[in-house]
Amino acid sequence: MIDRRRMLRHVFGLSASASAACLGSTARKAFAQTNQAHPYPTRTVRIVTPFPPGSGPDAALRLVSERLGRTWSQPVLVDNKPGGNGFIAVAAFKQGNSEGYDLIQLDNTHVTTHPLTFGKLPYDVAQDFAPLRMMLRTPFFVAVAADSPFNSIDDIVAAAKAAPGKINYGSWFIGSPGHLGALRLEAMMGIRMTHVPYRDFGQLYNAVSTKEVDWALGSAASAGGMAQSGKIRFIALAAARRDPLYPNVPATAEQPTTRGYEVTGWAGLFAPRGIPAALANKIAADIAAALAAPEVVERYRALGFEAPDLDPAAFSQLIQSETASWREIIRTANLRLD
């Protein structure tokens, strides 16, 4: 004889499973319908940037935003808000919404070193920004005047050891990647040099060309024109390998004394913290597709940029590891920007 209680449990168990499956199916359909009813984006997307028009990061952003506009069939507006250590751009960004229609381009100083050099920031990296994708990375060259007596980075290190504080270097502002990169060299080599900050790239590399400063770090995008015109020379690349654009310039990894000395600048796109994960991943994937477009790859190559394949999680981890790597260097240099 069939156990009535077992039969009822079996019947009701099947009913519960069927109901759950039905509810799951209904939820998936509802999600799909909602997605179809509210696709992203349905209006203009704004990308705020702290970089001025015509700069390397701005040029890269405009290439990517143009491709995104084609993919999304919606305008993508680049909103330049330079100045104020990026604070002006961040303030404009924070006035937007968390639905993916306001994004921001930031570089490594904004999210890895500013938290270490400013006692109080008008933003919190962990609370305000959701990393989407690194959109460019560029290594830095060691630049000197065309008639400089320095022919290698070892020459600069030797001169700095012989006369502490006498060798000077320039950068485009205090706390810039060029300034921090030189501090890293000082820390690695146990030397002391004098920092001379300038207002912008043009002023800086003119000072290098006239030997107003002994040397400076610079990317292919920012200093390449002066190098190609013969006004300055690149004597080293602070990287693990040579740049195909400048195959005759040795990488620091090639010399035992400077192996491990690497300085790169990068910029990435961020959404507001709190953006739905599915939407963040979609935007990140669309950015990656834009970066892979042949015309973008070709233009990046000419600018000396590369686009690392980092998804949001990997990008977030990189930010944390770079912040940790700068902490002791900045502490030792007692670098404060407020």
Image: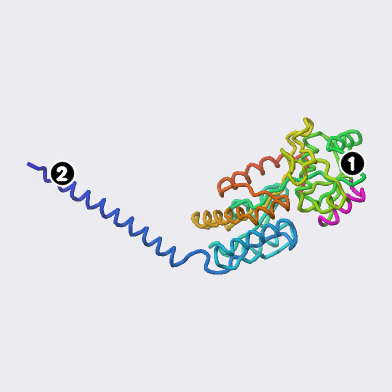
Q: Circle 2 — which element?
A: helix
Q: Earlier in the sequence, mark 2 or mark 1?
A: 2
Looking at the picture, which amino acid does disc 2 mark?
Answer: Arg
Q: Is residue 313 magenta?
A: no
* Magenta part, dominant SS: helix
Q: Is residue 193 left or right of residue 110?
A: right
Residue at figure coordinates x 36%, y 60% from the top left: 29
Q: Is residue 329 left or right of residue 76?
A: right
The reply, left or right, for residue 295 in relation to residue 149 is: left
| Res 192 label | none
Would you call the spot at circle 2 few (<14 residues within 10 Å), some (14-19), or many (20 or more)?
few
Compared with 330, 81 (above or below) is below
SS category of the residue bearing label 1? loop
Return the x and y of residue 120 as percentages of the image width and height.
69, 53
Closer mark to the observer between disc 2 and disc 1: 1
- Distance from Cα at disc 2 to Cα at disc 1: 89 Å
Residue at 11% x, 42% y: name it. Answer: 3
